[in-house]
Image (tube, rainbow, N blue to C red):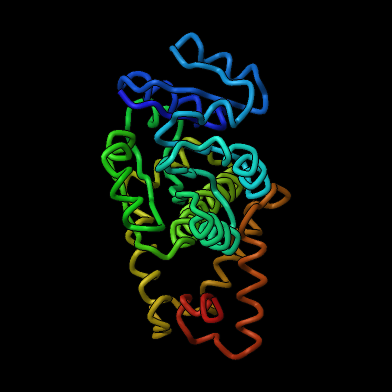
Amino acid sequence: MSHIAYIGTGLLGSAFVEAAIGRGDQVTVWNRTASKAHALQAFGAVVAATPADAVRGAVRVHLVLPDDGVVEQVIASLRQALAPGAVIVDHSTTLPATTAARSARLNAEGVNYLHCPVFIGPAAAREGKGIIMVAGRRDLFEQVQPALERQAERVEYLGERPDLAAVYKLCGNAFIVGMNGLVADVFSIASGAGVANPDALKLLEFFDPRSITAVRGKKMAARDYTATFELSMARKDVRLMIETAGERPLAMLPGLAARIDTLLAEGHAADDLAVIARDA
């Protein structure tokens, strides 16, 4: 049995705590909204009055916090109570530059810090599923690796560049947010043409956008603009999409149209659609 602490017990943090207790860990928790921490007492968690009280004696301190500012405040309040050799495992989604600076500063000051953001929802966390990415000192990763592998089904160590997991986390969330925006736009197009949203999703039964993303993504990365879908034709199709949606809201397509118009004005009409990433 390991004595660990969780600082931040919102939807994801609470799910991690429930799973850890289920694996036999002794877990102390703290949350800025005390009621969220106290709700975990029913599962066997010990609620601390302060972050410092939560981490005393813990071999690992898991942070599941909303932003860089809160991460800095919490670490400042708990660091003097850290046990010798304890590792801070920070699951928070944070700015890469700030993450790199924080990691360098803390480790230089003798605080063991790893950035470990996740692609895990609350339900997956309770079942030990999902992905944990790790960036930072290899010795610290090797120290916590067995525990992380019990926490998630896949653990990706990205190396000692301390901000790399933060970068990948933002890129992954860009896919998630962007795809949600595109689905919303698909619904607006379908609705504008009198097709119900569930019927529009039937398209995915025979059309797989993942393969399109992978193939054109490689063209973008390679800066290969040899046309298989000319930019001018893509812009015409986007115009048709916007016209079909009519007065319905669009999350993504207007911005895409504006980007294509800029490139068309620069003479890229005959280039592949991949050219939209030219300056990315």
Residue 279 or 165: which is nearer the viewer? 165
The correct choice, above or below, for 100 with respect to 62 in the image is below
From this viewpoint, which residue is outermost toward the bottom?
267
Residue 77 or 197: which is nearer the viewer? 77
Q: Quadrant of residue 3?
A: top left
Q: How far across and down, in percent of the image, does residue 255 sit?
A: 66, 64
Q: Quadrant of the N terminus?
A: top left
The correct choice, above or below, for 127 with respect to 234 in the image is above
The correct choice, above or below, for 234 with respect to 107 in the image is below
From this viewpoint, which residue is outermost toward the top?
42
Q: Would residue 98 appear left or right of 207 to someone viewing this image?
A: right
The number of discs equals 0
Q: Would residue 30 appear left or right of 126 to someone viewing this image?
A: right
Q: Would residue 144 appear left or right of 76 to someone viewing this image?
A: left
- The residue located at (40%, 41%) in the rendering is 202
- The residue located at (64%, 47%) in the rendering is 72
From this viewpoint, which residue is outermost toward the right?
247
Residue 153 or 207: which is nearer the viewer? 153
Residue 265 or 217: which is nearer the viewer? 217
- The residue located at (57%, 41%) in the rendering is 79
Q: How far across and down, in percent of the image, does residue 266 sit?
A: 63, 89
Q: Quadrant of the C terminus?
A: bottom right
The correct choice, above or below, for 58 with respect to 144 in the image is above
Q: How far across and down, in percent of the image, does residue 168 sit?
A: 45, 58
- The residue located at (69%, 48%) in the rendering is 249
Q: Quadrant of residue 146?
A: top left
Q: Quadrant of residue 154?
A: top left
